[in-house]
Every structure is written in C-alpha cells, then in structure tokens.
Amino acid sequence: MPPSARDNYLEIEVRTATPQKLHLMLIESALRSARRAREQWQLKQDEQALGSLIHSQEVLNEMITGMDREAAPDLTGEVAGVYGFIFRSLVRAGHRHDEKALHDAIRILEIERETWRQLCEQPANTHVAGHQHAGPPSPKFPVLRSSESFDPLPTGGLSLEA
C-alpha cells in the first residue's frame, strides 16, 4: 500500500476508533517497537534498538498522560502503575542493555494486548461487573480521556506504525 494510502487508512482508523480500540492500537504500537528493539539487539544494531525503545517509551508516556484520572481513580492508578513499570523497564533496558528488563516489558505488553483485544471484541450489550452495559462506552472511560481532549495523532513525532 502506498504511504499516503496507508497514512490515510491509519488516520481514519484512529479517528473513528472507540477508546478501547485506540488503547489497543497504542499497546500494539509499543509492543511492536519493543520487539523490534530486541531483534535489533540480536543483529547488533544498538543505535536502531535504542530508537525503537524510545518510540515504545513515547507511546507508553502518551498512554499514561492520556488517562482520565477522575473517571475511576483507583483503577486508573493501578493501570498507571503497570504502565509506569513497563516504561521504567524500557528505560532500564535501553540504559543498561538489559535484555531481562526488555523481556519483562514485552511480556506485560503482550498480556495487556490480549486483555484489550478481548475487551474490544465484546458485543455492545454485555454484562460488566453485574451491570447491563448497552451502547458505546462512556466518554469517561477510565483509561483514556474522551477523543475531544486526547488527540491520538499529535503533530509531534509519535507514530502508531513504528
């Protein structure tokens, strides 16, 4: 697919995504970059690996700063703690060339990806914690702020593709 067609598709996909799907896309981006760093280390491409680790850290930072801490403070605090651990593991991996720290970050990102993938696959009418849930998610979803206040395609250097 030509870059402009791919870019257009990605922009439409991001702009029309539910908060859950957007969160999943961010997790997948961070995971791809972390895995790429591991592969680059194996190929002795340390500088490229560092770039991949930094991209993964940037995605995690966007996820942490994009949280709506008022919607569900306890849950958001727990999720922020997990993402903070992943972020610190990625920093440690890059700073010390620590393969175990990178492995830990990848493992947790894989678990998060599967959790969010399952959440995205739930039908619109499901029982959540004993309550009937119908229709689109609340704009105060506990992890991401509403799309009005969180721009998933910032003009800066963050990319979901990397």
Image (tube, rainbow, N blue to C red):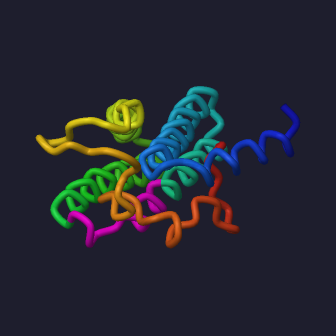
Is residue 24 left or right of 119 when viewed as pictured?
A: right
Most distant residue in the left direction: 130
Q: Quadrant of the N terminus?
A: top right
Tell me what residue is drawn at x 69 percent, y 45 percent.
Answer: 10
Residue closest to the eye, 80 or 87: 80
Q: How many marks?
A: 0
The image position of residue 161, as x and y in percent, is 66, 43
In the image, residue 62 sits, relative to residue 53, either above or below, namely: below
Expressed as whole percent of the image width and height from the top left, the position of residue 56 reads 52, 49
Relative to 101, 77 lies left or right: left
Viewer-side residue, 113 vs 11: 11
Q: Quadrant of residue 73?
A: bottom left
In this view, 107 is above or below 142? above
Residue at 41%, 36% (x, y): give it. 120
Towards the viewer: 65 or 130: 130
Q: Position of residue 11 (x, y in %)?
A: 70, 51
User: Does residue 65 belong to the magenta stretch?
Assistant: yes
Tell me where the magenta segment starts and ends, as one range. 60-72
Residue 82 horizontal/vertical position (percent): 27, 51
The foreground one among 137 and 153 is 137
The residue positioned 51% from the left and 67% from the top of the image is 150
**Quadrant in which the C terminus is drawn:** top right
- Residue 136 lies within the magenta run: no
Image-quadrant location for residue 115: top left
Give the image quarter of residue 63.
Answer: bottom left
Task: Name above or below for residue 110 compared with residue 83.
Answer: above
